[in-house]
Amino acid sequence: MFNFDKNNIMSHLIAPSLLSANFGNLQHDINMVNKSEADWFHLDVMDGVFVPNISFGIPVISAIKKLAKKPLDVHLMIVQPERYITDFKKAGADTLTVHYEAVTHLNRTIHAIKQEGMKAGVVLNPHTSIILLENIITEVDLVLLMSVNPGFGGQKFIENTYTKIEQLKELIIKKGSSALIEVDGGVNLDNASKLIQAGVDVLVAGNAIFKSANPSETIHSFKSL
Ligand code: DX5
Ligand code: ZN
């Protein structure tokens, strides 16, 4: 059910970010995503230390898991994420993504995530260079490129991301890696086509989906690009 093989992915995947959903009625928005053409749920965990904002954590993810009919793509914006790998597995994470900038022993952390039976991803902040992935790219299932400074939804897309996508694609090919490329932050219907053409496999979108007049129709538009 969880299609993660690059060769099997016919087109780009869409991962709506629940950070922009209505927290007063999450069930409504989860059902909308369930019924839509979206592929994954993108869940943003923020600790108020790694990023200047606090979102939600393990109990909320467990509650979402009970209602969600699609894989949970959990983006950890927390310090020392290695301390909580088992907890996020128990809560129902299918993919666990940690920030390069937050982890000292990245190789160990990536393998610990895989050991728990989850797909393992690494995230780069906008200023972090692709070249730093040279010695980890064959170990990860996913690279998430931040196209805004993490912490908040609704920010403006950073244009330099296109250059990073190009460099990442080159590195993936050079090293024979099967990592998916995911982009997060400021993604909308105006820049999504260019991102897909550049080689992005997974588009995360928060505001562009949940603040639109018809979220499920917007997801359809993203999938139709
Ligand atoms: C930002 C989060 C994003 C956020 C994206 O730190 O990682 O996932 O929800 O929101 P938009 O799509 O509104 O930029
Ligand atoms: Zn995110």
Image (tube, rainbow, N blue to C red):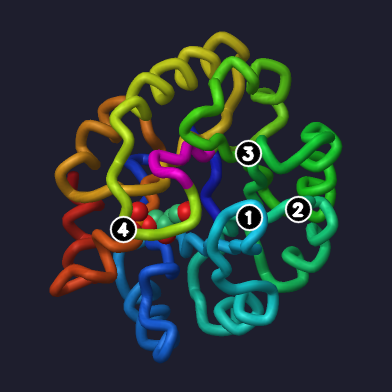
* Residue that badge 1 annotates: 76
Residue at the spot 53% in from the left edge and 37% down from the top edge: 125
Mark 2 residue element = helix
27 w.r.t. 75: above or below: below
Q: What element carries label 4?
A: loop
The foreground one among 101 and 70 is 101
The residue tagged 3 is 122
Mark 2 nearby-residue class (10 Å; few <14, some 14–19, many ≥20): some
In this rendering, which labeled residue sits more in front, label 3 or label 4? 4
Disc 4: residue Cβ within 8 A of ligand 1's nearest atom: yes
Is label 1 in a helix, a strand or a loop?
strand
Q: Percent x, y for residue 223?
A: 25, 52
Q: How far apart are marks 4 and 1 (CA)?
A: 18 Å
Crowd tier of the residue under label 1, counting other residues whose Cα lies within 10 Å: few below 14, some 14–19, many 20 or above? many
Q: Tell me which numbered mark, 3 or 4, is placed earlier along the sequence.
A: 3
**Cα distance, mark 3 to mark 4?**
22 Å
